[in-house]
Image: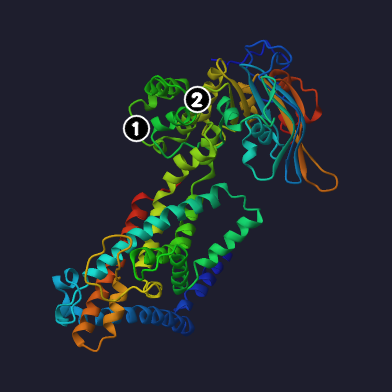
Amino acid sequence: MASATSSDTFPQMGSLGEVHVSAERRLPDAPVNPVMETRDLNVFYGDFHAVHDVNLAYGRHEITAMIGPSGCGKSTVLRCLNRMNDLVAGAHVEGEVLYHGQDIYQKNVDPIAVRTQIGMVFQKPNPFPKSIYDNIAYGPRVTGMKVDNMDDLVEEALRGAALWDEVKDKLKQSAYGLSGGQQQRLCIARTIATKPDVILMDEPCSALDPIATARVEDLMLELRNEYTIIVVTHNMQQAARVSDRTAFFTARPDETTGNRTGLLVEYDLTSTIFSNPNDKRTEDYISGRFG
Amino acid sequence: MSVATATARDTVRIATGRSRDRSAASLVFLGLLWFSLFFGVMVLVVLITDTAIAGSGRFDSALVTGYDSTLYPERTGFRAGILGSLWLMLFTAVMAVPLGIAAAVYLEEFADSTRWYNRIIEVNLQNLAAVPSIVYGLLAVAVMALIGIERKGIVLGGAIALALLILPVIIITTREAVRAVPEEIRQGSLALGATTWQTTWRQVLPSAVPGIATGTILGLSRAIGEAAPLLMLGLASSVRFDPEGMMSPITALPIQIYGLSSSSQQAFQDAASAAIIVLLVMILSLNGLAIFIRNKFQRSW
């Protein structure tokens, strides 16, 4: 649907290689009423300063991509957005992560409740060792969601993840029998079954072949109508194809310790980032001269 | 021409007519390995065969259905010992399995391994698995005194001793089974808004059940062969009634065997040999069950 490229909209495009930007939508320069926002976000693992002063706003019903070389802290930022970093021993967060204006790192915030609103899809498909049906029903069951008819909810979630037609006859079979791409779409279905507001995706296609990747990307564009999606990706073409806005991160080595601290270089509309970046480092990275 | 010489040279080098893997030193070493294997296995085979031959006259129904009899040594049976051992197993499992699993789950899923007290528990657990069994007998005697039960040789005391004995085994194997559940499964569950408790209960433990079951059964099969801690608790070698409850005096198969094998009458010694085979069959079937469970339900991630 939205993977069509329009070089009329961005005549300067193409100057940076074969990266094509999907851009049917006209968006404001900065997200209005962002769903999530990080303010001066700093993340430490023990003494290691992983991320330095990240200020980002994620727009409603937009896909925001976070790109950058390995070790630039983009996954770390992502995992702060639903407090999955709490699970890492020694992790420590400073600054604010706002969800509809509420700082999710306040003491009175329940991380479990945060994660029901802000779901996550991981790099490697991680279905549970259960049937396809039970994989979907798990989230609603554990969160105590009021469900009138679980069968309908499962169907809705699987349709939402464009998986229903492939699995409708084998709902009771193990999710491990699915292909990698199907497993990843099952994980997306599992996430949308709990009706989250935001879906975080941590390199969702890096373990998939190009065809499965294309299907997941199409799915992301469809999901954008109902959810806010924040995706970390190593694949610049992917960021260009699906995202509305792109944040470019890089890593800066500490002068004394040599530890690399991630920081945000540039954040803008994806079309701008890929056609007319402000920062030399962004341009070098997306044109393949660095990274 | 250069190609031809190169080929000729290589052929000369490799066609030496002998293999260095067949040199004298290699063969001697191989022979030593074979001898070690042969010696280890043969001793066992000879022992078991010898015991089976000695007890062969007694492979009858009275061996497992009758009580022991001083009047008719040739008809003495091990009903009380077999039932006693089974009762001990039951209560040992009832005490040790929930405790062991709970302790293991705490250590793996909830404990902060950087805390000093958790580290102390960790180190001690490894050591406890190597403590001689008779020490657990002493411990159980102390426990019985503490809870104020003076009767000797009852199911409860024996089960406490054996439960203490296999607790470290169960904890260690359960921890391994729990650790084998991939982190992605936990993260996937937590990311859906499940609590740590729900994740443990609904994802980790069900996936770890085969490993836990295997470890538990192997622990029990170790416990069933123990005599030393039970002797400490004063289990009699001769009991002529079936166990009826936790407070019922019992004997156990290893204790009965121990009692009879020191007897001067040949018939009793033969009966003890036959009972040893019965005990071996019980242990081997437990181990067989463990292997079956492991192969049948083992999951590869």
**Disc 1 packing (10 Å; few <14; some 14–19; many ≥20):** few
Residue B245: x and y, percent?
A: 29, 60
Residue that numbered label 1 is attached to: A172
**Disc 2 packing (10 Å; few <14; some 14–19; many ≥20):** many
* Three-letter residue code for mark 1: Lys
At 63% from the left and 18% from the top, the residue drawn is: A62
* Three-letter residue code for mark 2: Thr
Whether residue B52 is visible to the viewer of this picture, yes or no, is no
Q: Secondary structure at mark 2?
A: loop
| Quadrant holding the N terminus of chain B | bottom right
Residue that numbered label 2 is attached to: A194
At 58% from the left and 65% from the top, the residue drawn is: B2
Q: In the image, is B207 to the left or to the right of A19? A: left
Residue A216: x and y, percent?
A: 52, 26
Q: Secondary structure at mark 1?
A: loop
* Residue found farthest to the bottom: B264
Subunit that carries the residue with mark 1? A
